Amino acid sequence: MKKITIGIFVLLLCAHAHAQKFEGIAETPPLGWNSWNTFATNINEQLVKDIADKFVELGLKDAGYEYIVLDDGWMAKERDVNGNLIADPVKFPSGMKALADYIHSKGLKFGLYNCAGSKTCAGYPGSRGYEYQDARSYASWDVDYLKYDWCNTDKLNAEGAYITMRDAIKTAGRPMVFSICEWGDNKPWEWAKDVGHSWRVTGDIINCWDCEIGHGSWSSWGVWKIINMRNAIRKAAGPGHWNDYDMMEVGNGMTDAEDRSHFAMWSMLASPLIMGNDLRVASPQTIKTLTNKEVISVNQDNLGIQGFRFSNENKIEIWLKPLNKNSWAMCFVNMNDKPIEINFDWKKHNIGDDVNERNLDTKKDTYTIEDLFNHRNLGSTSKNLKGTIGVHDVLMIKLELK
């Protein structure tokens, strides 16, 4: 008996040593929608079907969005007699497989949420001790994306817990995006490249420009609080492994200008673009921002380089992102509470990305300038870039060699 036990133990160790995440997915940041920001646990089958319909009707699918992810609250409060997760029978009477089938029928992909702890953040059954069983359930329901949270984890080791679920997903045999959501507390950018396809770098976002909202032992963070929270992590991002700055708040109560800046910055940061608004009542301006294919293409650039802050003077932040074919994206963000004039002299600036050894040499080369939100040509770098930027608005441009 002892020999058999040791043999099984060795086999398990070998299987664990050779397990890995599914490769070849999330080669660019995932695009989709998540239920949490607007609906929390107040989700149901008809809502999700309506959202899937809106993906097609509003042009979001054509713009590249594909994942519809149910966050916390989709499951029943207790597992069944065999320990399996089951869908809440009131909210989702047809079950998860039927819902996945509906979403797949629209040419979209289906995602679910769970948690590494004993319970989810909202108190539903977590996956601790059930990782392989839950992964088999997700595979049987044709799930394409798993968001995996970090509540009620007691003394679990974060890296170990996420490796366990990664291995469970791989063993279940269905490729799915593995979205790590432990809020950056354990520096996942240092260890998660081979574990997940993205990892949250901060706590939860909230729909404000630059605020912090306390909830006792934790806080929600505004857009710029999140942007400024981490330093020196951009080198961790790349094809198949992304720094995740959380689900977007575009369309959730900020100004249209702030929404544009928010969307532009998530694209510059190569973060997953996961919508968090109610698409059934979204304004035309919100949809115009979210479906801007030129801005999305910056996010989806196949080099997979995360952008960086170039300068911050007079409350004008300038951000840069190297793109393929020696092109660059550039954002001028007005942090002031009044409109501001810019007059950027290309000849006075040495622009480069030392992490990726790329240079934007405007003294030697001439680049054309395209305004990505207003869809107009702004000339070239042979002349100063001039313009007016509204309050908390952005001028986002693409530079291409002539």
Image (tube, rainbow, N blue to C red):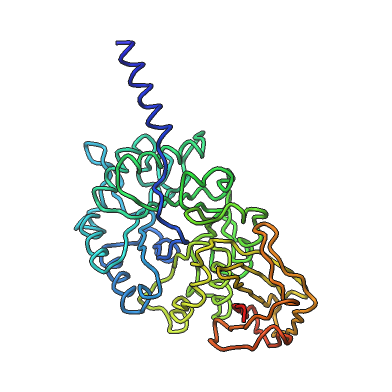
Of 120 and 328, nearer the camera is 328
Residue 318 appears left or right of 59: right
> Where residue 305 sits in the image (x, y, percent)?
58, 61
Of 339 and 46, nearer the camera is 339
Quadrant in which the N terminus is drawn: top left
> Where residue 80 sits in the image (x, y, percent)?
23, 41
Q: Residue at x 50, y 64 (%)?
A: 302
Query: Does residue 137 lie above or below 289 as drawn?
Result: above
> Where residue 165 sits in the image (x, y, percent)?
40, 41
Query: Does residue 261 lie above or below 233 as drawn?
Result: below
Residue at the extreme right: 348
> Where residue 210 sits in the image (x, y, percent)?
64, 67
Of 336 and 60, nearer the camera is 60
Q: Residue at x 36, y 27 (%)?
A: 12
Query: Does residue 234 lie above or below 188 as drawn?
Result: below
Residue 351 appears left or right of 28: right
Q: Residue at x 43, y 84 (%)?
A: 284
